[in-house]
Amino acid sequence: MLTVIMECRDQESELAQTLSVLVSGAVEGLVSDVVVLDHGSRDGSSRVADAAGCRFHTHWDIKDILRSARGEWLLLAQPGARPQAGWIDEVMEYIALNRQPARFAPSRTYRLPFFKRIGRAVPPLEYGLLLPKRQAIALAKSGMDLEALAKGQKASKLASEMIPAWVAHAAR
C-alpha cells in the first residue's frame, strides 16, 4: 500500500528512530516497503536499514527508485522524523479516499522557539509528504533528490502530527 522513502548521510541513530515508528505501520499492513537512499554514509546506516528489512541504495536514480516502489502511495520523509499516534489509521483512510498529496501536521510538543520560526522557510520534507506513486513518477527527473521532488507540492494537512527530524538531530 505505502512505500516510505528517505535519504540519509551519516544518520544512523535518526534512521533507527524513524524505522522503529514505521514497524507498527508494517504490522498493520500499511507500510509495504522502506527504501533508504544513501549519500555516502560512513556510519552504520546501512546496517540499521538492513536489520529493519529496508532496501538500501548507495547509487540510485530517483526515477528508477520510484518505479520499483511496491506501494501505490509514497511517504517521503527525513530520517529522524516520527509520525505520532493515530497516523496509521488516518493514512489508511486518506489514501483510500483521496488522490492529492498530504503532509502531517506540525508537532505541538516539539516546536522551534518563536523567534526562530519567524521568516523561516519550512523545508519541503519537514512534515513528510504523502503522494501517489503515479504523480511522483510524473514529476521525477533524473538526478533529482527527494526534497526537490517535494518542493512546491500543494498538499492537504493530515490531523496526525509528525515530530520533525531536527528534534532527533538536536538530541545527538
Image (cartoon, rainbow, N blue to C red):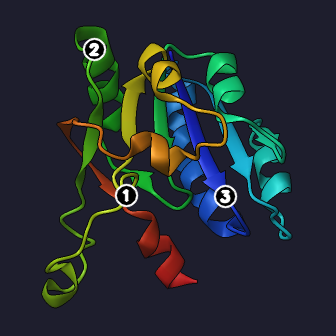
Q: Residues within 10 Å of mark 2 (few under 14, many from 20)?
A: few
Read off the residue under disc 3.
8
SS at circle 3:
strand
| Residue type indicated by callout 1 | Glu
| Kind of residue at disc 2 | Arg
- Residue 85 located left or right of residue 139: left
Label 1: which residue? 126
Would you say residue 9 is visible in this rendering?
A: yes
Check whether the beta carbons of the residues at disc 3 and disc 2 lie within 8 A of each other: no
Residue under pointer 2: 99
* Residue 86 is at least partly visible in this image: no
Residue 111 in the image: above or below residue 37: below
User: Residue 144's spot in the image, x, y percent?
Assistant: 59, 43
SS assignment at label 2: loop
Local SS, label 1: loop
Dividing the image into 4 quarters, which one contains the C terminus? bottom right
